[in-house]
């Protein structure tokens, strides 16, 4: 069976990495069963064969694949008879924009809102690594980053306008059914749901409705995962 | 032959509408010849059959189609044997995000930078309409909107990060070749080039390189159009 190294929190069943969620949703889309292996930030050694320090890492027989986009490409190429993640070569090229926007806008907006919540849920052995690396990245303490979130969430909601433009016309970014573009966008929202009770979205927001649909996919794979109500 | 009502400036050959450019690039992609008819904001009567006041409006025999996205859908459905604008049903659904981002982020960032330049290039008979409608939309005078552009352009360039994420991997948003997603994004840049000499992009920016490729497509359709050097 496929194996996936999947970031876990202090509780082994709290699996919150946005990039691991992209991969888990992609695997479910393909109808592929996977054994997830809990992994912590400091467990660099067990994935050393990939010559890099981050999950998700997928193991398929003797092949090790890291990076969520590379894993999606691998699954699409290796399991072509199963439902497509991209809807063809053009769809794959076009999906890079969803992933790129998620990486450069969505994640950046979200992390400020939930940074302290992440810190409080990660394994104690990861905390020094997490605080040091994130405080270096932000140039301030975790507490300072999080201090303004009641205001920051308003700008965050404004930043979702391009998503709402699409959801006026269709229920998923892939159209009538979700595609990898949806999983790339959803990963960030699921990340927050797993480790924070902070209210990101208002119920009347079309993005809220889309997130509900995503939480229900694959028999509630994401919705049933350990986390907080949205 | 197909006819297109195409926004013109004070000079009849200055054609600057970003939405008309989406359509002209889409027609060229399909290899369809078109006669463009210069149109001004106040020429509502000649497109009255569409029951709305905006261009582009495409006339194909006895069919009148307005709205650049609807025109792209029409061209794809009506001329299926010519090169696809979307790369399939999934590609069409996915392209809505590029168009939605262009409408809600790119255009909003650009208009602040070139609003006075538009005003100075439009037909004198359009100026009252333009000033009144835009000052109402912005809640300030045209001059006030434009006043801070040397600072605003820095935030504008930052807002292009999702584009750069994609251009790390491929030359066009559609992949190795452009698709409608590229035209949706390009329309805004071409709009500015047609009516402003303000420097939007630095030459070392991958978005600059992509814009150069777009300007050269279809024997330089966009690059040879009346405008300013970029």
Image: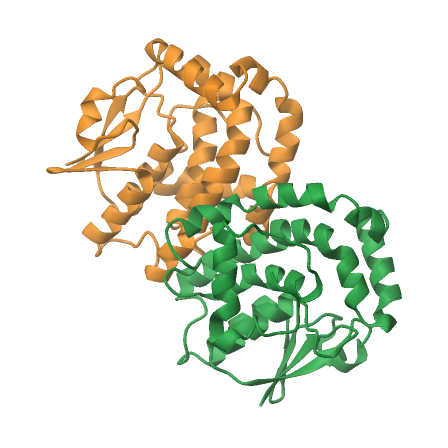
Chain colours: A green, B orange
Q: Nearer the viewer, residue B206 or A216?
A: A216
**Depth check: A24 or B181 in front?**
A24
Residue B227 visible in the current orientation: yes
Percent position of residue A133, x then y: 83, 59
- Quarter-of-image position of residue A15: bottom right
Q: Is residue A171 left or right of residue B6?
A: right
Give the image quarter of residue A63.
bottom right
Please determine whether, in this image, residue B178 is positioned above or below residue A65.
above
Residue shown at the point (28%, 26%) measured from the top left: B53
Q: Residue at x 78, y 49 (%)?
A: A146
Residue A170 percent coordinates (x, y):
38, 55
x and y percentages locating residue A165 in the rendered image: 44, 46
Residue drawn at point x = 27 percent, y = 22 percent:
B39
Front one among A114 and B120: A114
* Residue B221 visible (yes or no): no
Horizontal relation, residue A48 to residue A223: left or right? right
Rendered-image quadrant of the N terminus of chain B:
top left
Whether B206 is drawn above or below A103: the answer is above
């Amino acid at each position: 069976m496929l194996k996936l190294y999947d970031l876990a929190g202090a509780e082994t069943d709290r699996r919150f990495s946005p990039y691991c969620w992209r991969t888990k949703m992609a695997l479910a889309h393909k109808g592929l069963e996977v054994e997830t292996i809990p992994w912590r930030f400091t467990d660099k050694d067990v994935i050393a064969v990939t010559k890099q320090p981050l999950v998700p890492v997928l193991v398929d027989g003797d092949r090790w694949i890291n990076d969520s986009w590379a894993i999606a490409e691998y699954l699409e190429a290796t399991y072509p008879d199963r439902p497509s993640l991209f809807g063809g070569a053009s769809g794959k090229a076009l999906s890079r924009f969803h992933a790129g926007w998620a990486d450069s806008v969505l994640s950046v907006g979200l992390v400020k809102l939930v940074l302290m919540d992440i810190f409080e849920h990660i394994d104690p052995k990861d905390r020094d690594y997490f605080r040091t690396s994130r405080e270096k990245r932000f140039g301030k303490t975790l507490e300072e980053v999080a201090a303004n979130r009641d205001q920051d969430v308003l700008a965050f909601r404004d930043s979702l306008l391009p998503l709402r433009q699409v959801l006026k016309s269709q229920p998923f970014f892939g159209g009538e059914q979700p595609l990898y573009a949806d999983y790339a966008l959803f990963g960030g929202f699921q990340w927050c749901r797993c480790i924070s009770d902070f209210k990101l979205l208002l119920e009347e927001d079309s993005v809220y409705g889309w997130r509900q649909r995503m939480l229900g996919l694959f028999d509630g794979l994401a919705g049933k995962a350990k986390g907080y109500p949205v």
